Image: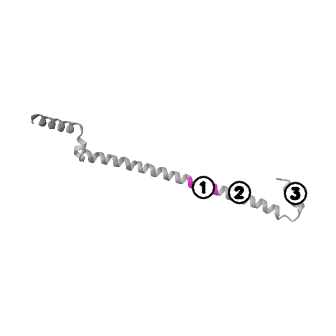
Amino acid sequence: MNIQILRQDLQNTVIQTFMPPLLHSGSLKTTTVNNLWQKVHSIKHSIAYLLLSVAVIYFFTLLFAFAAVAGGVILISVFLFKIFHLKSRKQCDEHLKYF
């Protein structure tokens, strides 16, 4: 019985000496769960920012790709319009010699 009292006293002394913040904020289990939750919350924010930046990059990539395709279609259509709507074959031949 005397050994149990000494053991309990030693445990209390170690806890009070080395872990005062844990005693003030609650039990060790609660503090560990809170720290774990803060880490998970931080990771969730990091993943959210990463996904947001990927979405923004993807959006602008699609925007520029669409603009490039639209510009190409416009250039080709203007070129074809000039070729097929010229008044004579001679004008068409003169126009094609530049390309």
Coloring scheme of the render? one colour
What secondary structure is marked by label 1?
A: helix
Check contact, mark 1 vs mark 3: CB within 8 A. no
Is-magenta flag for residue 9?
Answer: no
- To which residue does mark 1 refer? 62
Disc number for residue 72: 2
Amino acid type, callout 3 = Glu
* Mark 3 crowd level (few <14, some 14–19, many ≥20, 10 Å Cα): few
**In the depicted structure, whether residue 59 falls above or below residue 12:** below
Task: Please tell me how many numbered marks the rendered image carries.
Answer: 3
Q: Residue at x 89, y 62 (%)?
A: 89
Q: Which span is picked out in magenta?
A: 58-66
The single residue placed furthest to the left in the displayed view is 2
Check contact, mark 3 vs mark 2: CB within 8 A. no
Q: Is residue 66 left or right of residue 77?
A: left
Q: Nearer the viewer, residue 2 or 94?
A: 2
- To which residue does mark 3 refer? 94
